[in-house]
Amino acid sequence: MPHNILVADDDPHIREIICFALEKAGMKTAAVADGAAALQAVERRAPDLIVLDIGMPEMDGLEVCRRLRQKSDVPVLFLSARDEEIDRILGLEMGGDDYVTKPFSPRELVARVNVILRRARPAPVAEEDDQQFAHGKLMLVPASHAARFDDKPLVLTAIEFAILKGFLARPLHVLGRDAVMANAYASNIHVSERTVDSHIRNLRAKLAAVGCLDAVETVHGVGFRLGRCGG
């Protein structure tokens, strides 16, 4: 079945370009021109992913994402006309999965959408063979995209889940930022170090909220490693 993508941008030309590129790649699209309409569209039918412009009037993309994350983990790819680092970090900290700056290459946007969708889609059970990853009180089940700490459910974005799975697969290793990126993104996608730092910060916050205060440790000058995850 083709993926359903919601495109929210107040520029009709941008909406047309994005929808054309995604449909050419075999996806179905719906387009809206403002944040309120985006939230209404999600209520009617949850898409597989939202391409969300940050700079929309009245209700910007950051506020849309904040409201979405109160009840949904639908993947979000942010768009912005500004290449301000603070916008990128805010978007990721609000629960966005990735960030593309205008002007953008439609081909790159489609590639990033595909990366997020692959991460969000549970692998076939036969491929994963019901494999589970456990460390301390932390457990991940990739086949069902389930994560728990001390039997408390964790709601993770696709990228956050992939990063955490990478740590759990090598719990004693220190992973540099390049290795963390490789776990979360396709090799042909460039991601800044600050983007990885934002995802790590989000993971720590979500795990701390359920009682895990030692989830990911920083090894200064080297990278990150999994903590004891003992509470």
Image (tube, helix red, strand yellow):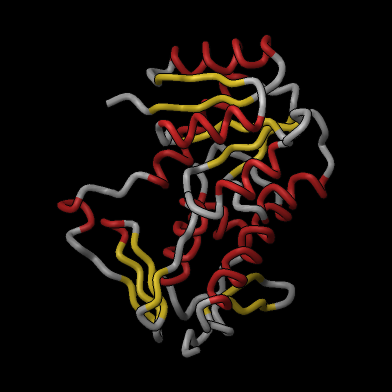
202 vs 30: above or below: below
| Quadrant in which residue 4 is drawn | top left
Is 118 placed left or right of 197 in the picture?
A: left
Residue at 17% in and 59% down: 129
Quarter occupied by the N terminus? top left
Q: How many marks?
A: 0
Frontmost residue, 97 versus 188: 97
| Quadrant in which residue 189 is drawn | top right
Frontmost residue, 18 versus 221: 18
199 vs 22: above or below: below
Residue at 51% in and 52% down: 159
| Quadrant in which residue 153 is drawn | bottom left
Give residue 190's position: percent from left, percent from top.
63, 41
Frontmost residue, 31 versus 226: 31
Give residue 12's position: percent from left, percent from top.
67, 11
Residue at 47% in and 90% down: 230
Give residue 149's position: percent from left, percent from top.
41, 78
40 vs 106: above or below: below
Is 87 placed left or right of 48 in the picture?
A: right
Give residue 214's position: percent from left, percent from top.
57, 84
Frontmost residue, 5 versus 66: 66
